[in-house]
Image: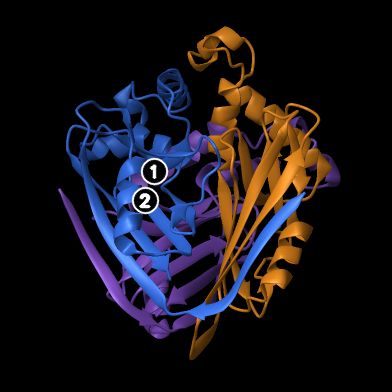
Chain colours: A purple, B blue, C orange
Amino acid sequence: MQRSHINFKGYLLKSYRKELWLNIPSRLGFVNITPEVDTALRESGVQEGLTLVCAMHITASVFINDDENGLHQDYDNWLEKLAPHEPINQYRHNETGEDNADAHMKRQIMGRGVLVAITDGKLDFGPWEQIFYGEFDGRRRKRVLIKIIGE
Amino acid sequence: MQRSHINFKGYLLKSYRKELWLNIPSRLGFVNITPEVDTALRESGVQEGLTLVCAMHITASVFINDDENGLHQDYDNWLEKLAPHEPINQYRHNETGEDNADAHMKRQIMGRGVLVAITDGKLDFGPWEQIFYGEFDGRRRKRVLIKIIGE
Amino acid sequence: MQRSHINFKGYLLKSYRKELWLNIPSRLGFVNITPEVDTALRESGVQEGLTLVCAMHITASVFINDDENGLHQDYDNWLEKLAPHEPINQYRHNETGEDNADAHMKRQIMGRGVLVAITDGKLDFGPWEQIFYGEFDGRRRKRVLIKIIGE
């Protein structure tokens, strides 16, 4: 079964931009930022279009998944297994004085950002989709970019 | 060498939305949905723009890769190695009564969706690019969203 | 703290397309293509919008991360651990005569491409974001697609 909706009227393009600032108190952490993206969408007034939500830092992610605490602990353990923080000296990047090479890897698995369709002025989501900020090298202020284009 | 094409005429924005429904009979599976996306693009009439194709469920992916059976078996084995289904009780998420924590991880590696350029009314693809639905927790009906914006 | 900018004037949609050709002399390699994307953006004249930058080949990636040599060596080692090239015969895909099944996996971890916001005629980046072409099966000419839409 397929349902489709075509909008043949043409519209002028509008754009909107917003930054969110976050400061995660631990090295790793996940925050549900769906309410903030919802607010931004309402402020933009865009009814049909696309919204990009992405980390502006290269040791963090924005991704879409489930708002379930156990799953987030599973992500922590799993990412630590795939890209362990310790020993620090296993990474060449850490010879620069950093200790966050693993965070650059964890971020690649979880992705930099997401693109969400806007339909009828709403984030066009399936039943369980929620937008998360994923921090892999926290304890400092970081930014998320929301960019909306559409009409 | 670089080739470029600039379209300086301005156009009014059009949008299009369609849902595809799939029911994969096994837990894991890959389906080539390029023909369905092609059809949607023709229906939309959009000549220049972008099309988002994404899973509306958080234990599934839409990704672009090769339509080769052996490779898909390799993906199955590889994802099972990186995020094993068994033992179920290794994941906190499965304490909620689910058994699909691994599917939430496999989906992060393969991604939620893809964004494809539209040029001259066609999906702007390299020689082997094909769009796949990747299922990691099947045996029930799930949706893919196609959202097209452009002119 | 949140900062936002809304553009309520409507604009006509413009589109721009460019291909970059690359030939990486080794099997694996990373190239910073930010200057080429900057040039494309200037050529397009787009002030507000989105730019898609993606590999047109399914054994390569375009991703955003740090321009740091040690980190790129770490990525090499890490991807080789997660999806080893050898032994070739561990992959069904390689029974077709190919030896690049691992490259199809490495590309899924690093992603097919990126979507970058355009604000005030510039790539809307955080402090360290740079765009890289990631090659996992090189020694031949391959293409990157840049598609810009906006006003």
Q: As drawn, is B104 to the left or to the right of A137?
A: left
Chain label for disc 1: B
Q: Is residue C78 above or below residue C53?
A: above
Q: Is residue C20 visible?
A: yes
Q: Determine the residue positioned at 61% across, 16% down.
A: C99
Same chain? Circles 2 and 1? yes
* Distance Cα–Cα, label 2 vs label 1: 5 Å
Quadrant that contains the N terminus of chain C:
bottom right
Please give left or right for residue B136 compared with residue C2 in the image: left
Judging depth in this view, the residue of A124 and B92 nearest the camera is A124
- Given residues B121 and C17, the one toward you in this image is B121
| Earlier sequence position, callout 2 versus callout 1 | 2
Say how many tags the image has.
2
Quarter that holds the C terminus of chain C: bottom right
**Can you identify the residue that label 1 sits on?**
B62
Q: Position of residue B116 (x, y in %)?
A: 47, 53
Q: Residue at x 51, y 72 (%)?
A: A147
| Local SS, label 1 | strand
Residue B59 x/y as whole percent:
32, 41
Q: Chain of mark 2?
A: B
Q: Amino acid at mark 2?
A: Cys
At horizontal 35% and vertical 56% (from top left) the residue drawn is: B41
Residue indicated by mark 2: B54
Q: Position of residue A96 (x, y in %)?
A: 84, 45
Helix, strand or loop at label 2? It is strand
Q: Label 1 sits on what residue type?
A: Val
Classify mark 2: residues with Cα within 10 Å, few (<14), some (14-19) or many (20+).
many
The part of the image, by quadrant, that contains residue C137 is: top right
B92 lies above or below A107: above
Q: Are marks 2 and 1 in contact (CB under 8 Å)?
A: yes
